[in-house]
Image: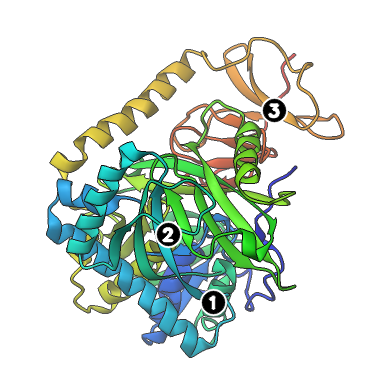
Amino acid sequence: MRSRSFWLDGTGDPPPTSRTPPSGRDVDVVGAGIAGITTAYLLKRAGMTVALIEADDQLATGVTGHTTAKVTSQHSTIYSTLTRSFGPETARAYGTGQQLAIDWIVSEAAVLGAEADLSRRDSYVYAEQESSVSQLRTEADAALEAGLPASFVTGTDLPLPVAGAIRFTAQAQFHPRRWLLALAAMIPGDGSDIVTGTRATGLTEGDPCVVDTTSGSVHGRHVVVATHYPIFDRGLFFARLEPRRDLVVAGRADLGAVPHDMYISAEDRHSIRTTPLDDGGVLLIVGGEPHRVGARASVARHYDDLSRWAQQRFPVQEVPYRWLAHDLTTVDALPYVGRFHPRARNVWVATGFGHWGMTNGTLAGLLLRDLITGEENPLAGLLDPARRTVRQSAAEFVKANAYVAARLIGDRMDTAVARHGTDSIPAGHGRVVAAGTRAIAAYRDDDGMLHCRSARCTHLGCLVVFNDAERTWDCPCHASRFATDGRVLAGPAVRPLPPVEPPG
């Protein structure tokens, strides 16, 4: 079964877009996920002219269209982590920002009359083992000290034996694409535009800045890079971000047989929520199977394991939807929102949301609006990409970059390249094969035709890995993703995998 996100099914008509990038706007926002659309919407509301530029033909179809869409300040057990690493003030500031994002979404949805299936729900981090209870109590205490609506409980509406849980009251959930299309509908006009099917390929900083795209150059006073993994990487983000992903499966269930609230396991990261269907039914959404992007394992097998886990616990007969929830984690667990690099004056970035992009992406938009318009914001220092947190982040920095170095060195030694040829590649599958000194990404389509591209990622040259569930080539170093015809699906790469001759 090919991957298919429920959020991308039947979400209505998008706002009017253009294929020709406009020039001379106050702000060019590159990337139309939750951070980019929210930023563009807020800047337009602040009286600035905006050009929102998206590489895909549609809006919010990337990472934001492949999330579980929980709108919550409960980010697993982050508050005890932040308290331990930075102190209670940092934990309180982080929590305050998340609650601000929730409240803004709820209030703005009411103003716009957005039909986004937005509803208030409680959120839980739960544990099935008694050995995990002390960790949950510590987290509950840290969250409560941070001013959050937290408590430790032993009862939930899960059909699972739960030893304990942390409850956050009055959180929310929604349909992310319906929400973002409602925001995006307010952007065009009065000098602002949305441009789709146009990939940014280069940046010249200055006054104005110049963004090179596949449809021509764009001039703007400010540029916001909201492309998930920052392209034009001048802030060394590739060394400070770790790409990881969870898988998601979803299927119809009986309303009385599934939990009302939102859940995530403290032990194995299984995530549980529901969403209403247009026919009055309910869809159960289950996430899990976390792993690093490009891990040499069958993604299809991970999907099968997750579907089995869901069907063993809930009355879900079939799973028509499955998708990748892909995100980036910073080395100190706090997002990067602010100036693109220490010397940047008019270029801004938002990234590293750590699988909690619904609130962190919204908070990024609120903060970037203030930074660009010159308003004071108390969270600016906390999320500054140039912050110095060497002591708190050293271990994660070393671990993340040791992994990348191992992949680079190992790949250069051809330890990951198959020595046999392409004849044994079945239809619908791909393999990296050796041809002399070259590494070739070879894919055989459903009609039996072989398609060969260079297997070296066009970002920094790591060897790509075939994703057997998505039928994509994924880079294990910095999470660039490519279609089987070489097209860039996700950065930081901006150039496609070049075609090569099949091995002789």
Residue 306 in the image: above or below residue 94: above
Disc number for residue 357: 2
Q: Is residue 228 visible?
A: no
Q: Quadrant of residue 437?
A: top right
* Label 1 or label 3, whichever comes before in sequence order: 1
Which secondary structure, mark 3? strand
Circle 1 residue: 184
- Quadrant the C terminus occupies: top right
The residue mark sitting in front, 1 or 2, is 2
Three-letter amino acid code of the residue under disc 2: Gly
Q: Is residue 17 visible?
A: yes
The residue mark sitting in front, 2 or 3, is 2
Horizontal arrangement in the rendering, residue 503 relative to residue 393 (left or right): right
Q: Alpha-carbon distance for marks 2 and 3? A: 31 Å
- Quadrant the N terminus occupies: top right
Q: Position of residue 406 (x, y in %)?
A: 39, 21
Circle 3 residue: 430
Question: Are dots 1 and 2 in contact, CB under 8 Å?
Answer: no
Three-letter amino acid code of the residue under disc 3: Gly
Three-letter amino acid code of the residue under disc 1: Ala
Q: Alpha-carbon distance for marks 1 and 3? A: 37 Å
226, 461: nearer the viewer: 226
Residue 81 in the image: above or below residue 15: above
Q: Position of residue 364 (x, y in %)?
A: 35, 66
Q: Position of residue 82 (x, y in %)?
A: 21, 51
* Label 2 or label 3, whichever comes before in sequence order: 2
For the residue carrying disc 2, how many other residues have a C-alpha within 10 Å: few (<14), some (14-19), or many (20+)?
Answer: many
* Label 1 or label 2, whichever comes before in sequence order: 1
For the residue carrying disc 1, how many other residues have a C-alpha within 10 Å: few (<14), some (14-19), or many (20+)?
Answer: many
Horizontal arrangement in the rendering, residue 154 relative to residue 17 (left or right): left
Q: Residue at x 80, y 34 (%)?
A: 445
